[in-house]
Image: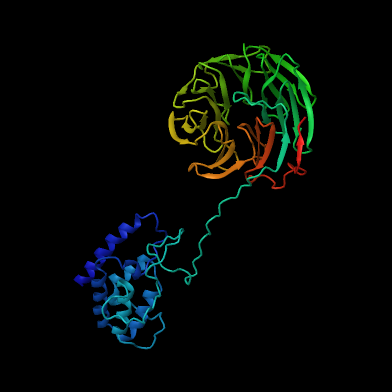
Amino acid sequence: MASCDKICKVLDIYEERLSKNKYLAGDFFSLVDLSHLPFTQYLVGQMGKEYMKTSRKHVSAWWDDISSRPSWQNIRLKFRTFRHLQFSHVRPRKRRPFYCLSKPLGATLFGPDTPGTPVSRNIFRYKTETKRSLHSLQPLGYDESGLGISHSPVKAPRKVPTSPYKVLDAPGLEDDFYLNLVDWSSNNVLAVGLESCVYLWNACGNKVTKLCDLGIRDSICSVGWAQCGTHLAVGTNNGQVQIWDASNCRRVRTMEGHRSRVGVLAWSSSLLSSGSHDKSILQRDIRARDDFASKLVGHKNEVCGLKWSYDDRELASGGNENRLLVWNQHSTQPVLKHCEHTAAVKAIAWSPHRHGLLASGGGATDRCIRFWDTTTNTHLSCLDTGCQISNLVWPKNVNELVSTHGSSQDHIIVWRYPTMSKLATLTGHTTRVLYLAISPDGQKTVTGSGDETLCFWRLFPASKSQNTDSKIGASSFGRTSIR
């Protein structure tokens, strides 16, 4: 039994190696799975000799045991005790000489070129060269079509419509990189700033309402909806921030504090942040009597990008001096500073899928989308898009990213994250795409351009909690005006 002990020792070593392999689940093997081991020929020879000592009537039953692919543990047990195996549970078959079996077995274990192997015999019918299935957990690549094994099909890439489903004329929409004139509320109402006026477009009924007119002495520089969707903040060229009750078309409050235009606004659940050409950010609580609660100073040029994280704990700001700053709820000094961009940082987006994941985009001389982990202050990656980046949006339904571009490209790109491979490139504007907002259901986006049009795109699938039937765009085809 010395030879048997050697075999068991080798099998113990091989079992230990296999138990660490993460691609093997269940440890189901046959002798074919051991065909690449150097001791296999010796193993087969030893088995043949030992079994020749037993009754010849058990040979066919032993062969059936091999072809039935028992578990790895059973194979080890049979190798250790094959002198004393009982085959009473197996129906005997017609006796055949052992040499009739050893040759096909050798061909299966060592390939069809094994000396003495009949060419026409192929008991297992394994393919010698088969492409392994993507989902296969088997250590050898063989044809599984006859084994009753089914794999999940590879999911086909999602197709994104590359044409807008609706276009609105927006006469007077400014071609200014530093303004933010479009925002979409949680109540499905789109706000657009056109010169000195703000217009509201109800996406459910395609109804347009004029909210306000500042007159010839002032103009709209930014708009931003509160999270509740009922109140709209309006930033003006004179440095004011006005709060409007959209349902009643009534101005609720006017807040001062900035010395120059307010080009960007960002709401958290309790605060309104405003960024200005005067290089400052003001934190405002509209419930309080004071016009602002605190002043954030850190930028050396106009503040053109501003976005609160989804948990309202961090505020990211971008400036025309090419810096990206991150503030916490209570700080008046930035907790993180990033200077890797080489152009104005207007495009900022927080991931709704991962805490602390931030994306930022640079202007015409930078052209890069950069990713940051604010929890570890780590620069994760950088992608050169080849053109100016004016906006970024991270949808809640899928882990993808939308960017809008200018500087001769004038298109919109949908990216897969984290690979940053292009899912779709959308064209529809004739000048740079400066404005971007996403619908409350997370399925649609609207883009605005200096060509004085607003284009609506169906980009993302519905989330699992949403009804796939949407009211948006029920009568959306055709071209109308927002005025």
* Rendered residue at 57%/25% (across/down): 305
Q: Is residue 283 above or below residue 383?
A: above
Q: Quadrant of the N terminus?
A: bottom left
Residue 16, position as x, y percentages in the image: 30, 58
* Rendered residue at 63%/18% (across/down): 262
Q: Is residue 202 above or below residue 64?
A: above
Q: Quadrant of the C terminus?
A: top right
- Colour mapping used in the image: rainbow
* Rendered residue at 65%/30% (across/down): 450
Residue lying at the far left in this picture: please name it.
Answer: 2
Q: Is residue 86 above or below residue 20?
A: below
Residue 313, position as x, y percentages in the image: 55, 26
Is there any visible trace of residue 351 in the rendered image?
yes
Residue 255 horizontal side relative to residue 304, left or right: right
Q: Nearer the viewer, residue 193 or 205?
A: 193
Q: Is residue 338 above or below residue 290?
A: below
Is there any visible trace of residue 185 in the rendered image?
no
Residue 275 horizontal side relative to residue 38, left or right: right
